[in-house]
Amino acid sequence: MQREARRLLLLRRQSLIADVARKQALRALAEALDTEARSAALAARSRGLVNASGARLGDTTGAALRARADFTAGLSHVAVQAGEAARDAARQRIWQAETLTRAETRARRLSERVDEARAALAAAKAQREAARELPLARKLQSRAES
């Protein structure tokens, strides 16, 4: 019976650890989704600003033209970096989803094993109780026959 109780205790601890891992994986997946969305939005907004900052009608100075070109180049660079960050976050999202699936599977299996260990402990207790009552029943039976 002690062996069953120790096994149940160990499985409960492992189950708690698995639940924590599942929650961490879920949080990491949410963060990856958020990062992916923010990066994609930044890339789209930066590309939109680059497109909107095209040539203007009218006279302009060389310095203003140079400043606009520098600004557009900077925005273009930001758009490229944000696009790369969005792709990286998408890969991270896929990996985190797989991690979450593994964590949920482990938690489910441990939960099943905890249920089995509980049943084994209950059976061991019942068997021990039945073994304890058996000599008493024999004594009572032999006295009744006398």
Image (cartoon, rainbow, N blue to C red):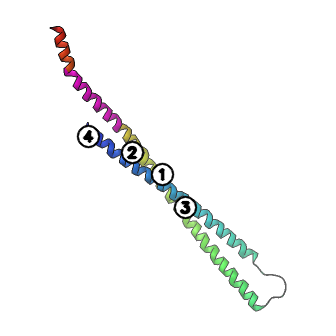
* In this view, the mark in front (2 or 4): 4
SS state under label 1: helix
Callout 3 amino acid? Ala
Task: Decide which of tag 4 and tag 1 comes sooner along the chain.
Answer: 4
User: Going 44% across and 50% down the picture, which residue do you hit?
Assistant: 19
Task: Decide which of tag 1 and tag 2 comes sooner along the chain.
Answer: 1
Disc 4 to disc 1, C-alpha distance: 31 Å
The label on residue 110 is: 2
The label on residue 3 is: 4
Where residue 38 sits in the image (x, y, percent)? 62, 65
Magenta range: 117-135
Task: Decide which of tag 1 and tag 3 comes sooner along the chain.
Answer: 3
Depth check: 16 or 90 in front?
A: 16
The label on residue 45 is: none
| Quadrant where the C terminus is found in the figure | top left
The label on residue 101 is: 1
